[in-house]
Amino acid sequence: MVEWAPWLLTHKRITQRALLPGAVLTTVGLVALMLLASYVMEFSVSLYARDYGGFGVVLATYLDPAQLGWAASLSPALAERRLLRRGRSTS
């Protein structure tokens, strides 16, 4: 799915072979994120549950993925800034 979704979304203009490195990197990143989240979420849920009870579990369940999403949203902005520093156009 990691490989064929972009292939279909680009109307099959990009070969699947060209998409393979991105698919492999995405898969490795998702596995690493799952492993990291299993440790971080366990700590976070137990910490919030101890302080806030059932509401803390809900709070931890919603806040931890939101923080990861916020960090991931910085990536394109930082990449654009890096390109501007190097003197390359972003368009």
Image (cartoon, rainbow, N blue to C red):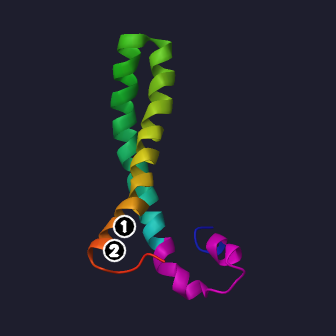
Residue behind mark 2: 83
Q: Circle 2 sits in a helix, a strand or a loop, which is it?
A: helix
Q: Is residue 19 above or below residue 78?
A: below
Whether 90 is among the magenta residues is no
Q: Circle 1 sits in a helix, a strand or a loop, which is it?
A: helix
Labels 1 & 2 near each other (Cβ < 8 A) = yes
Instruction: Looking at the picture, tell me which residue is in the foreground, 10 or 61.
Output: 10
Instruction: Please give the name of the residue rendered at 67% of the width and 87% of the height, measured from the top-left corner.
Output: 13
The span picked out in magenta is 5-23
| Crowd around label 2: few <14 · some 14–19 · many ≥20 (10 Å) | few
The image quadrant that residue 67 belongs to is: top left
Predominant SS along the magenta part: helix
Q: Is residue 12 above or below residue 42?
A: below
Judged left or right of residue 54, residue 32 is left
Mark carried by residue 15: none
Residue at far left of view: 85
| Crowd around label 1: few <14 · some 14–19 · many ≥20 (10 Å) | few
Instruction: Please give the name of the residue rendered at 60% of the width and 84% of the height, measured from the top-left corner.
Output: 16
Instruction: Please give the name of the residue rendered at 30% of the width and 80% of the height, measured from the top-left corner.
Output: 87
Q: Position of residue 73 (x, y in %)?
A: 45, 53
Instruction: Looking at the picture, tell me which residue is in the foreground, 8 or 54.
Output: 8
Residue behind mark 1: 79
| Tally of numbered discs | 2
Whether 13 is among the magenta residues is yes
Q: Position of residue 7 (x, y in %)?
A: 65, 78
Query: Which residue type carries mark 2?
Result: Leu
